Amino acid sequence: MGTSKCQKTTKLCDKRECKEATFYEIIVIHLHLIRCKSCREYSKKTQKLSSILQKASIKKMCPHIKQQLKTQFQEELNEAASQTRN
């Protein structure tokens, strides 16, 4: 998937899975997938992942806990960066 057309197609596949692709973009995807085995495989994998995620009962994280995790993550990143400088 090294060509610019493949990169564009994979982005469109992702957009399609998020239900944000236009009808024209979906047509572009299908035309490319006819010719490109790598992108067909990528498309199958993203569709499978989307299906699994839709079936899972995932709940949103509480904003308070999310902020705590962000803060903790940033602190650990800063600590790791300071250790690599020494």
Image (cartoon, helix red, strand yellow):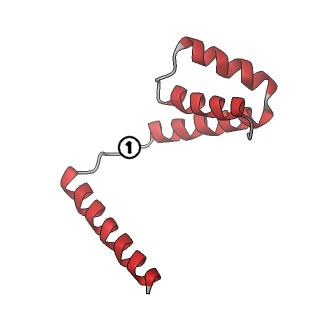
Residue at point 74% right, 35% down?
A: 3
Using residue 72 as the reference point, say whether residue 31 is left or right of it: right
Q: Residue furthest bottom?
A: 86
Residue 58: give x, y in percent of width and height: 37, 45
Check the image and report above or below for 69 versus 38. below
- Seen as rendered, the residue at the extreme top is 24
Closer to the camera, 21 or 81? 81
Q: Name the quadrant of the N terminus.
A: top right
**Residue projecting furthest to the front:** 85
> Which quadrant would residue 83 be assigned to in this image?
bottom left
Question: On the picture, is 67 further left or further right than 27?
Answer: left
Disc 1 packing (10 Å; few <14; some 14–19; many ≥20) = few
* Total labels drawn: 1
Vertical relation: 24 (above or below) 49: above
Residue 40 place in picture, x, y as percent: 73, 32
Relative to 85, 3 lies left or right:
right
State which quadrant residue 41 falls in: top right
Would you place residue 73 above or below residue 6 in this image? below
The residue pinned by badge 1 equals 57
Residue at 38% over, 43% down: 57
Element at label 1: loop
**Foreground of the two, 58 or 78:** 78
Residue found at x 29% / y 68%:
72
Quarter containing the C terminus: bottom left
Residue placed at 59% from the left, 37% from the top?
A: 46
Position in image of residue 35 (x %, y %): 81, 24
Q: x and y percent of residue 48 in the render?
A: 59, 38
Which residue type does callout 1 highlight?
Ser
